[in-house]
Each structure stands twice: as C-alpha cells, then as structure tokens.
Image (cartoon, coloured by chain):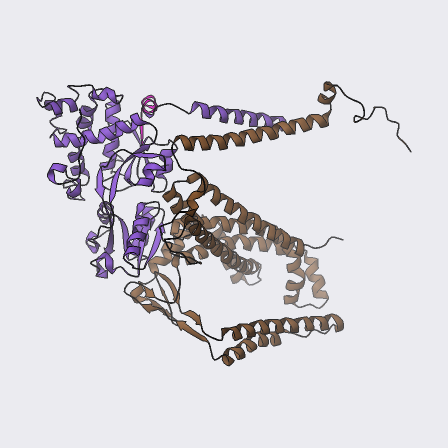
Amino acid sequence: MKRPSKRPSPAKVPRSLSGYVYDPKARGLALQAIVALLLVWFVAGIVDNTIRNLEAQGIASGFDFLDNTAGFDISQSLIAYTNTMTYARAFLVGLLNTLLVAVVGIVLATVVGFIVGVARLSGNWLIATLATVYIETLRNIPPLLMLFAVYFGVLKTLPSPRNSVELPFSSYLNTRGLYFPAPIWGEGTWLFVLGLIGGLAGALLVYWKARRQRLLTGRANSALLPAIALVIGIPLVAFFLAGTPLSFDYPEAGRFNLKGGVVVQPEFIALLAGLSLYTAAFIAEIVRSGILAVPKGQREAAAALGLHDGQIMRLVVIPQALRVIIPPLTNQYLNLTKNSSLAVAIGYPDLVSVFAGTVLNQTNQAVEVILITMSVYLVLSLLTSAFMNWFNARVAIVER
Amino acid sequence: MKYWFAGCLALLAGAGQLADQASAQTSTLDTVKSRGQLQCGVNTGLAGFSAPDDSGTWKGLDVDLCRAVSAAIFKDANKIKFVPLTAKERFTALQSGEIDVLSRNTTWTMSRDTSAGLSFAGINYFDGQGFMVKKSLDVVSAKELSGASICVQTGTTTELNLADYFRSNKIEYDPVVFEKLPEVLAAYNAGRCDAFTTDVSQLYSIRLTLGNAADHIVLPEIISKEPLGPVVRQGDAQWANIVRWTLYAMINAEELAVTQANVDQMKDSKNPEIRRLLGVEGEFGQAIGLDNDWAYQIIKLVGNYGESFDRNVGAGSPLGIARGQNALWKDGGLQYAPPIR
C-alpha cells in the first residue's frame, strides 16, 4: 500500500532560505557546525595565545629538549641509565617505574581485595569482623596520608644498614630496603629454559587430555598433580644435566650500605603497599557486592545438583558475579594507576617525580612536559579500559 | 540546552581572544602600584633567608630584599604579600605573573637567565653546595661517600651538581629525591640517607632545626658555585632596574657606612656619593620610575646590606655565618655594587 504524499520531497524541489530555517534537521546541523567551529576557534585561540606569550617572555618551547643530556641521577631504573643520557631516556625510566608499580599494585590489590571481599561474607564471625574493620578503616583514609604512614612509619622502625635484620637465603632488611642475592646465570642456561618450556607444554597437554576425557566420558580426572610434576620435574632435570649453571651475587656490608645483590627500595615497597592495600579495600566491597548480586536460588540449585561448596563458588557464583564486578573494578585499576603519581611525596622516582618534577625544572618547559605527562596517563587509562572492556565482553553472560 | 552550550562557548572563546590582546603591555611597576602591594615569592621556610617568626612576620635576608623594594616604591616596608614557594613551583609562579619578584635563594645559572624567560637582578648571597652527615658515621670528607645514599630536594641545581661531582670523582652513590624540604629532612632523620646535600648556608640553617645540632657535621668540600639572587620576568627592563638597584643601594650604603640609625644625619653629609645615594643630589630615583628618596627609604626602613646580613644570618643571628665571600670587596669579599652616578 502506498501512502499518498502531501508534501513534495525536499530533495527534489529547490527551497527558499526560510525553508531551511524552519527545517529542524537543517537547523540542527547548522547549529552543530557553529558549535564545532566555535570550539575549534577557542582551542586555536588558546594554542596561539600560549605560543605567543611564551615567545614574548623569552621562554624556550618545542620538543627539542628531549635530546639534551639529562645530567641528573635516578635511584631506581629498570633499564640502563646514567646521567649522561638524554631527557627522553629519563622519561622512559620514569614511565617504566610508574608502570612497574601500577602493574604489580593492580595484581596485589586484586588478590587482597578478593580475599578480603570473600572474607567479609564469611560465616566465621572473627574473619568477617576483621575484614569489615580493614575495609572501613582503609577506605576512609586519604591515600597520601596512607603513603606517609607506611613510608615514614615503616622507615623509622627499620634498623640502620649496620644492624640489618637477617632473613633466610642471605637476604637483609634495613632502612635502605630489602636486599637479596642476585642470580647469575652461567653457561648452559639455555638447557634449563628449554626444560621450562617443555615442562609447561607438557602440563598444558595433560590438562587438555584430562578435559577432553571429562567432556567425553563425564569422569573427572584431576590433571593437577601430573601437571605440577611436569612443570617442576623437567626443568629440574635439565638444570642438573646442564651442570647447575646458577650462582648468586650476595649482598655484603659496605661502608654505608650493603653492596651487591638486588635491592628493593623502601620507597617502592611503601608505595606498592600503600596503594594496593588502599585500593584493595574498595575492590573488596566491589567483590562483595558482586557475590551478593547472584540470586540465592543459583546456589541452592547448584547444591541440589550435588556440587560441593568450592565448586559452587568457582563454577556458579563467581562467573555470574564477575559481570557485576568487572566494570567498577576497571575504575579502581585506573584510580590506582593515577594515584601512583603520589609517589613524588615519598621519593619514588615515578613519571611525575622524574619527568614532571626534575626534568620540568631543569628545562623550564612546563607546557610541553605537562602535556606529555598528561597524555601518558590518558593513554594508560584508555589502554586499561580497553583491556578490561575486552575481558568484560569475554566473561559476560550471553543473553539468550 | 544546546543553545546554552553554544552561547557559553561563544562567550568563552570571545573572552579568550580578547584577553590575549588586553594582557600585553602594562609595566610591572604600574601593576604593583595600582595593586598597592608587592607580591614576593619566598622560601616556604628557611631560617635566616625567609621564614615566618613566632608572630607570623616574615624575616630573613631574602625577605629583606622584598621589604627594600616595597620601601623604595611605597615608602612602607610592609606592603608585601609573601608567597611561599617550593623549589619546583618558583619559576612557574614568576613566569605566570603570580609574583612580581622571586627572592628565594635561587641560583643564577645561564639556562635560567636565558631560555626560561627570567632575568637575574643581582647576587645577594654567594653560596656553594656542600654535604651534611651524621657525626656517628665518622666521615670527614665528601670523597669518602662512596656507596652512600644521599637525600636531595628536586627542582634545584643541587641535583645536577651532585651528579657532576660524583661522576667526575668516579664515586658511586644512591640519590633519594623528594619534592619538599620537610620530607627530605624526615627521610634524613629516619636514616634513609647517609648524607643530605644542598647549599651550605641552608645546611647551617637546617642543622639548627635538627634537634641536637652537634650530632651533624657539614663536610669541608664545597662542590659548586651558587650565586643566589632575586629574579624577575624577562622583558621589563624598568622593573629589573628597580630590583637590581635596590640591592645595589643596600650594598653601596654599607660601603658608605650609611646605616638605619644614622641615615637622617647622613642626609646632611658633604660626601657627594652619599648625597647622590640619598637623593639629596641628582635625579636617580626618577630614572627608574620612583621618587628620588627611594634609597633613603630603603635604608631608613630596612637597613643596609651589612645590617640585614648581620641580623638574619650573620653574627647577630642564631646561624652565626661569617661574612666570608659575602663581605664587601674592600674587606676581601665579593659584594661589589656599581656606583650611583
């Protein structure tokens, strides 16, 4: 059935100007274009104004400074760095330090958060109360205060390097950090690495076979023990076949500090502990809300099918809780990463401390340095979000 | 909703474009005069140089320079808003116009004077970088600091001198960098570092605040030149002249033995140099946009350089720093002001 058209189609008949003014679509488009133009004009004005004012005040601008010699030292670096390298290299050192604390912090916060979250739901009164106290205390402390408390609180109680606390495996703890022996891999290490890869591959194979058998026959064979045996056994055999190619560089007492070995600095420990314990309190609440969001009937149905408690949690509750947990969890991960910039207060050489601190001050190019720093945090946040969205899509329950 | 948004944006954009035309070309002196107040950037707290006393009044050598500028402009040494700044914040505060003059134990270096949009207006303290260590470590020379942890404040020339010194002496060390002085000191006190490094004048000042000062010693090595002085924005020659000649007037007054106490009698002096300094002869004040009695006001209200040095950091103060390099040139020091004529 054809609808009789009363009006001529606007595309075919030429219209007067007033025709466009009264057409809501055309009017909307025009307004949007005006807003876009104003926005461009506004931004261009800011950029132009900044450049002209920098010139008028005789302040150097541009990104050439990145190739200049930095000239200062950084206490912790994941890549080789000396003070004769460039500002760009110092930027990279700071960025990696930020990433290190963010990644390790996220893992730690997640683990602690899940444990505390589940503990708060525990039937055991003591465990549930302890978890509640933990959450309510830490959630209500400003993160900066938390860092100061952890850093100066811990630092004051630790002994001086001359009276280090001795830990097992030739490790030492003092005000300068945690020292442990550095492994030195000798000749024949490749055999050990090969053994490790072989062991992992073997374990995967065993797991797949057990899974296929379970799906085919319904009989559950635990693949755990053989898998562990493979992962540990094969590399161990390879290690001894290669003639134990491993020695250690032990920390020894120097005049001021211990020399040699690997040092984990107190700034890193304090920042990591402060950030992850703080964020864990929030994650715990998210986990609790996720678990409580799964209807009780699901649990009862699983129990009726004969699953035991561990299985109910692992196979029924957690997968359903995850879709409630993951979106707010992403938020906490972003918070942790951004809060890591508080490192500047306790002397950990993160991106803000090294780049937006020392480099900014030596070069005096505030606009460029802050712009780069903000872009880095933006990119980190977007990457984290993208990953979590992907993960969320994977675990989301498919609606039918 | 949409219309509101567009309207606001248009206003903002228009305002932004207009502001950048209006902001150009007003002299700092006119701005300060019309505001009725000098905005002076100082240290957040460094005894002897700039620190508030028990009653909240700012005192110190750097503070006195600001008071002198205020005296020259307003004939009142207290028309000042002191803005305490960390090492990291100070240049941005000056560049952005938040303060008119930065008098905050700032080292004069080439890059700061040229590419940072700043101009140094003179040197009010000749300093050098040194180290402070706990006496119990039995260290007597900086060359023994191999393998030591050293606390530093960021945003200073200190960080670079430290790296240079240890690199050229091929000594390894472990820097621990903080943004604010209180945190550096807390870390030094907690034993995180073996040594603390900064300008020697600051070391003496800080040592007084560390409980038992005798437990800490300042090592003899001076590893750098640190000429400290007031800083202004580049591009306003008149303002730079005012700050520069305020300092020179104080130094010249000491050389001519004009003091806070005798400045009124000195007005009748027959010495032409003193007569020019105090504005009895010549039109030197007008040349920098002020009244001719500008230097008289400075000396009357603040005192000459020697008096300021003595009561803030010298023999008359708890710091008790000797004049040394900061003595007048005729006494074997480096303080030398061009003549007023």
Image quadrant in which you'd find residue A18: top right
Q: Residue furthest left?
A: B270
Q: Which residues are magenta?
A: B29-40
Q: How many numbered discs, if any?
A: 0
Could you say where residue B70 lies in the image, as x and y percent from the top left?
26, 27
Q: Which residue is nearer to you in this view: A78 or A291? A: A78
Task: Describe residue A167's horizontal placement relative to residue B307 as left or right.
Answer: right
Q: Colour of chain B?
A: purple
Does the segment drawn in magenta span residue B35? yes
Chain represented in brown: A
Locate residue B330, reporting x and y percent. Answer: 11, 37
Q: Nearer the viewer, residue A109 or B223?
A: B223
Q: Is residue A292 visible in this depiction of the protein?
A: no
Where residue A7 sits, quadrant-wise, is: top right
Quick check: is A89 in the magenta stretch?
Answer: no
Q: Is residue A283 left or right of residue B110?
A: right
Q: Position of residue A95 (x, y in %)?
A: 47, 52
Q: Give the image quarter of residue A58.
A: top left
Q: Is residue B150 left or right of residue A34?
A: left
Image: B90 above or below B243: below
Report the residue that reaches farthest toward the right.
A1
B317 is higher (above) or lower (below) than A55: below
The image shows residue A223, relative to residue A16, as above or below, that is below
In the displayed structure, A20 sits above or below A213; it is above
Horizontal side of residue A379 vs B177, given as left or right? right
The quarter of the rendered structure image containing the N terminus of chain B is top right
The quadrant the C terminus of chain B occupies is top left
**Residue B58 rendering spot, x and y as whole percentages:** 26, 35
Is residue A312 visible in the rendered image? The answer is: yes
